Image (spheres, rainbow, N blue to C red):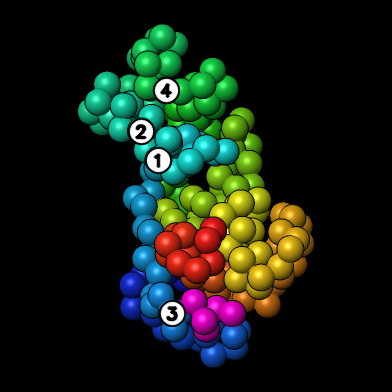
Amino acid sequence: MMIEILNEQKLVAACQDLAGRDKDLAFIFRTFGTPPLWAREQGFPTLVHIILEQQVSVASAKSAFDKLKEKLEEITPEGILSLSDAEIKQAYFSRQKTLYVRGLAEAILSGKLDLKSFDNLPDGEIKQVLKKIKGIGDWTADIYLLMACLRPDVMPKGDLALHVAWQKLKNSEQRPNSEKFLQIAEKWKPLRSVAARLLWHFYLNAKNSRFQI
């Protein structure tokens, strides 16, 4: 089975495709250009970083991730398990996220989770495997698929920035909830990951424009 992944060149072509069939995404593409690929390396450190990003700002998560790197230099499952609760807390981890990353580390070391096996697996199977790990839900699995695996057709479930961007783009009084937004995103298949990047691009750039996000 041939697995399609995005790269910089494919991203431009995909944006052009979406702009040709959706006037709202065309506006973003025309106004702000091609979004970043926002690619991340596959592996344990990236999953830890995404767990840290759950329900907090990107800046807060990066601060915690950078602090963890200071302590460990290289973020590995063995390294995480070598730290005491107090040491992890010093890296701005909550008690809950400490449990999550410890559980993730144990799953990898025990062989329960093999991130290297993902290259040839379809999106649905990867998501199913990841969600067996405590602390990894739809959003975390979706972001890993979209940014680390670079799969082209993933819409992160429950991503608030995407919902806000769509609300502002449509000049709507009502923000779509998670299920409603997933329904809206059906029209962007098989390039939902690209639509998400365009909307994030709008969200970040429109903060400094008349949209006042």
Real-space Cα separation, disc 2 to disc 3, in angstroms: 31 Å
Whichever of callouts 4 and 2 sits on the residue coming sooner in the sequence is 2
How packed is label 1: few (under 14 Cα within 10 Å), some, or many (20 or more)?
few
Specify the segment rendered in magenta: 24-28
Real-space Cα separation, disc 4 to disc 1, in angstroms: 12 Å
Whichever of callouts 2 and 3 sits on the residue coming sooner in the sequence is 3
**Image location of residue 53, percent across then percent down:** 49, 39
Real-space Cα separation, disc 4 to disc 2, in angstroms: 8 Å
Label 4–label 2 contact, CB within 8 A: yes
Numbered mark located on residue 63 in the image:
2
Residue receiving disc 4 = 92
Residue receiving disc 3 = 31
Whichever of callouts 3 and 4 sits on the residue coming sooner in the sequence is 3
Which residue corresponds to the image point at 59% horizontal and 32% vertical from the top-left? Answer: 135
How packed is label 3: few (under 14 Cα within 10 Å), some, or many (20 or more)?
few
Magenta region, main secondary structure: helix
Label 3–label 4 contact, CB within 8 A: no
Q: Is residue 62 magenta?
A: no
Residue receiving disc 1 = 59
Name the residue nearer the viewer: 61 or 30.
30
Mark 2 lies on a secondary structure that is helix
**On the rendered structure, is 147 left or right of 168?**
left
Whichever of callouts 4 and 1 sits on the residue coming sooner in the sequence is 1
Mark 4 lies on a secondary structure that is loop
Which residue corresponds to the image point at 59% horizontal and 80% vertical from the top-left? Answer: 24
Seen from this angle, which residue lies furthest front?
Answer: 210
